Structure formats: C-alpha cells, structure tokens
Image: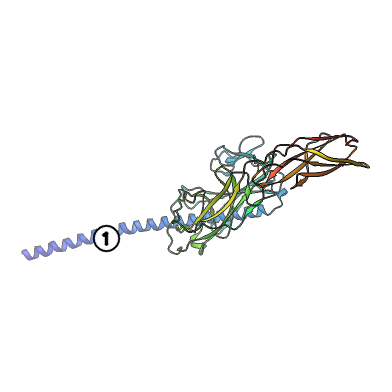
Amino acid sequence: MRSLNRLRDEHGSNLLEVAVAAGLVGVAVIGLTGAMTFGMVAVGSARQRSTAVAAASERIEQVRNLPYSEIALDVEPAHDPDADHPNHRVTTDSPSLYDVHGDGSLVEPFAVGGSLTHEEGPITAGTTVLHVYQYVTWVDDPNIDGTENYKRITVVASLDAPAQSGLSSQVSLSTFTGEGTVTVPGATPAPIGSPDPTPTPSPGPTPTPNPECDSAPTGTMEIISGAGAETGYTSSTTLQVQLSASSPDPDDCDPLDAQLSNDASTFSSVASLVSGIGDTVTWTIPAGDGTATVHTVFVDNNGNASPIYQASIILDQTPPTVPGNLREVSCSISSNTRSVTMTWDASSDTNLSGYRMYESINDSPFSIVNTTGDTSSTQGSNKTEQSVRYLVRSYDKAGNESPDSEILSYAKNSC
C-alpha cells in the first residue's frame, strides 16, 4: 500500500512539471514573437527612411543641375495648420516666408517665378509611398552686398504610412546654390596618433544589429565657402560641407549617419546618407582668423564607424586697410576720350589679393571698371559726360573689401 501511494505521488509530480514547462515554453514563444515583430518593424522603418533619403537626395541633385536662373518655385506655398505637415513651416505672412529651423530663428523669402513644382506625389518605391515637397528660398549673406545672395534648396520627403509609430515621418535635406563656389579638395584621413575618439551619434532609434553588416563605411568631404572668395578661403563662419559615403553592403548597412566635429572629439549628426549619394550640409566653425579644420565620420546602422576624415579652410574676417592717397599721375584728352592714370598707397592685409577701381558717371552708383594687382590704373571716359568720379578699394582672398579710398572727380571737357 505504501509503495502504491509513493508511485501515485511521483506520477502526480511529473504531470505538474510538464504543465509548468509547457507554460514557460509558451511565455518564451510569445516573447520571441514580440522581439521578432519589433525587429521586423525597425528594419521596415529603416528601409522606408532609406527610400525617403534616396528620393530627397535625387531631387536635390536634379534641382542643382538646373540653370541658376531657373531654380525657383512656380507658385508660393501656403501655410498648413497641421504641425506634422511640411507646409507648417510656411508662415502666414504676406508674402509668405519659410521657417528654416522650425523655431522662428531664421525665416527666408521664397524664390518664385520658376518651373519647380512645390508638391509631387504620391510616389511609390516598392512598398513605400511618399510625397515630395520642394522649397527654394533666398539667402541673405551678411558678408555679401544685397539680400538675394544665393538660394537655399530644401526637399522634404514625407512618408504616407510610416512603418514605426513615434518616429518622424519626414526626411528633410537642404543645400545651397549660387553663381560662384569655393571647394577645398583632397579631404584626407586624420593623421594617426592618439586613439581616435569614439563619435557620439545624436539620440535616435536604436538600430537593429545586423550580422551581415560587419565592414566599416568609407567617405569623402569637401568644404565650400561663399561666393567671392578664392579657393581655400572664407569670410564666414557658416560653411557648406559636401559629404558622400559608401558602405560595402548598402542593402544591409544603409542608411549612414554623417557626423561633423570642429575638434575631432565631440561629433554631431548632420545628415542621413545613402551609399553613393552625396549631400551638402550647413556647419558653423568657431570665430577667429586662421586655419579651421572640420572632421567627419560616417556610422552605418550596425554601429560600424569609418576613419575620421578632415578638410581645412582659412577663415579671414578682417578687411584690408584703405588704399590711401588716391591721386592723379597724368590726364590727357584726345578727341572725345579722357584718359586718366591714377595711383595710390598700398593696403596692408595678410591675405591681400588686389584692388578694384570703381567709376561713377553723372552721379550714378559706383561700379567696378577694373581689377588689378598693382597700385595704379589707367581709365578712359567720355569727356562730354557732366561728371566722372573714381575711387579704389582693396580686397583679400576671402572676399573682404576695404572701405572707400578718396574720390577723384572730373567735370565735363576737363582734365
């Protein structure tokens, strides 16, 4: 009897253990299913954003290849009250302005009168559906005369149905275009010395590790200064930096997080790139004349980081001194032509480039009539004009120009 009870107890214990084990297996399966679902959603979101970045980048390049005079919108966009709509950054002013940063710190007027369509879509790429919004605005560079110095092109690719909620449904890329640029070529990896600092990406969704993505990306960078400067110089602390990167396995490793730094220690994310498609971003360097170096690193979606690349440019915000003592060397009249040879004292500047002679006829605004590296110039004019005036300014390699010199004036029919 005692043996039979013992067998019954053992038999009951085995059934209980089986039930508990089955329950644990069920919990594990549910957890695994949830993890797989989250991973699939994250991968789907990454692929959607890669598609959006590719669409925006392609559109940027298409617009940049247009003639400068044609880069403008066909109509002025209208404000949208929906905070999630790209047009929410269009102000309610008349005419409307574009809120570049979305916080009111920088607003710019639209460039209109061109053939660019503001909104296009829906655009379907695989299973991704999106709309593309284009904005072209005038940029006022404080270092250049006038207000419409060059144009900012902003393209926003907006996903119609994001795969992952809680993340931005928009990818925004911007670049500048003008009638003159300065490029610093030959970005090279930083010299090997102390161990490279670990770049710190901006906060964002944690990428799903991908065992297929195990090789670091590579890339290039170029610094672009504003119009009016010679190669390798700039007069503004606000730079445009061209970035391009590639991954050995784009399908598994894109998008690539592009990060910039002024000290090769603290990095900031500035763009999300697709292999082989470049982007131009705005970057600010510290004030102070001298050589400024910008560093970049590219990080793929599995955390693999490229070498640190760098490019340098000379910042010069100090204008040359005034070319003093503008004076006449000789003046002669032949038929209706007056010929005047002038000279002046040399300006001083570390990066002095030359001098610009300006002329005003009959009190019209002064305009450039000659550029020279010498401290003299010979100018001809019609002696029958009521008045002809001359002045000279010096300029440096960064595009800074000195104040006006003295003015030489000539009356009608006189020397």
Q: Position of residue 226 (x, y in %)?
A: 65, 47
User: Quick one: SS at disc 1?
Assistant: helix
The quadrant holding residue 209 is: bottom left
Q: Position of residue 14 (x, y in %)?
A: 18, 63
Q: Is residue 134 visible?
A: no
Seen from this angle, which residue lies furthest right? 335
Q: In the depicted view, which residue is nearer to us: 338 or 213?
A: 338
**Horizontal relation, residue 367 to residue 266: left or right:** right
Mark 1, residue position: 22
Vertical order, 17 against 239 (above or below): below
User: Which image quadrant: the C terminus?
Assistant: top right
Q: Position of residue 188 (x, y in %)?
A: 55, 58
Q: Is residue 98 visible?
A: yes
The residue that appears at 72% across and 52% down in the rendered structure is: 67
User: Which image quadrant: the N terminus?
Assistant: bottom left
Q: How many marks?
A: 1
The quadrant holding residue 30 is: bottom left
Q: How is the image coloured?
A: rainbow
The residue that appears at 61% across and 37% down in the rendered structure is: 91
Crowd band around label 1 with a 10 angstrom C-alpha radius: few (<14), some (14–19), many (20+): few
Q: In the depicted view, which residue is nearer to us: 351 or 243?
A: 351
Q: Position of residue 66 (x, y in %)?
A: 70, 53
Three-letter code for the amino acid on which mark 1 is drawn: Ala
The quadrant holding residue 331 is: top right
